[in-house]
Image (cartoon, grey):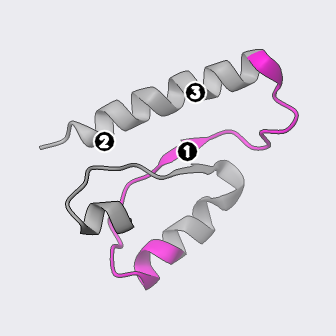
Amino acid sequence: MAAERLGVPAIGVMTTQFVSAAELMCRVLGMPNYEFGVIDHPLSSAGDAGHAAMARATIEQARTQLMQV
C-alpha cells in the first residue's frame, strides 16, 4: 500500500487465513478498495509443487490487478 501511495504499482499477497485482517488494515489505512492476491493457507505444509502452484496463482492475480485501467 505504501508503494501504491507513491504511485508505484504493487500487489500485496495474503493467505486465506489473513484475508479479514488484510481487509481491516486496508480500511484503517484509508484504502478500503485495495485489491490483494489471495493464496491458500498454510504455506508451510504445501511442499514444492504446492508452492509452485501458489506462485503461478499469485502471478496471475498480480497480472490481472496491475493491468486494470
The answer to which of marks 1 and 2 sits earlier in the sequence is 1
Tell me what residue is drawn at x 58 percent, y 27 percent: 55
Q: In the image, 48: left or right of 19?
A: right
Give the labeled residue for mark 1.
Answer: 38
Seen as rendered, the residue at the extreme left is 69
As for residue 32 lying within the magenta part, the answer is: yes
The answer to which of marks 3 and 1 sits earlier in the sequence is 1
As measured in the structure, the alpha-carbon distance from the residue carrying label 1 to the one carrying label 2 is 12 Å
Query: Label 1 sits on what residue type?
Result: Val
Element at badge 1? strand
The answer to whether the residue labelled 1 contacts the one labelled 2, judged by CB atoms less than 8 Å apart, is: no
**Callout 3: few (<14), some (14-19), or many (20+) C-alpha neighbours within 10 Å?**
few
From the viewer's perspective, is the residue at label 3 or at label 1 nearer? 3
User: Eyeballing the image, is 9 above or below 53?
Assistant: below
From the viewer's perspective, is the residue at label 3 or at label 2 nearer? 3
Element at badge 2? helix
How many numbered circles are shown? 3
Residue 59 % position (x, y): 45, 28
Give the labeled residue for mark 3.
Answer: 55
- Depth check: give the residue in front, 29 or 10: 10
Residue 51 % position (x, y): 70, 25
As measured in the structure, the alpha-carbon distance from the residue carrying label 3 to the one carrying label 1 is 11 Å
- Depth check: give the residue in front, 23 or 4: 4
Residue 18 % position (x, y): 66, 60
Element at badge 3? helix
What span is colored magenta in the figure? 25-48
Give the labeled residue for mark 2.
Answer: 65
- Residue 34 is drawn in which quadrant? bottom left
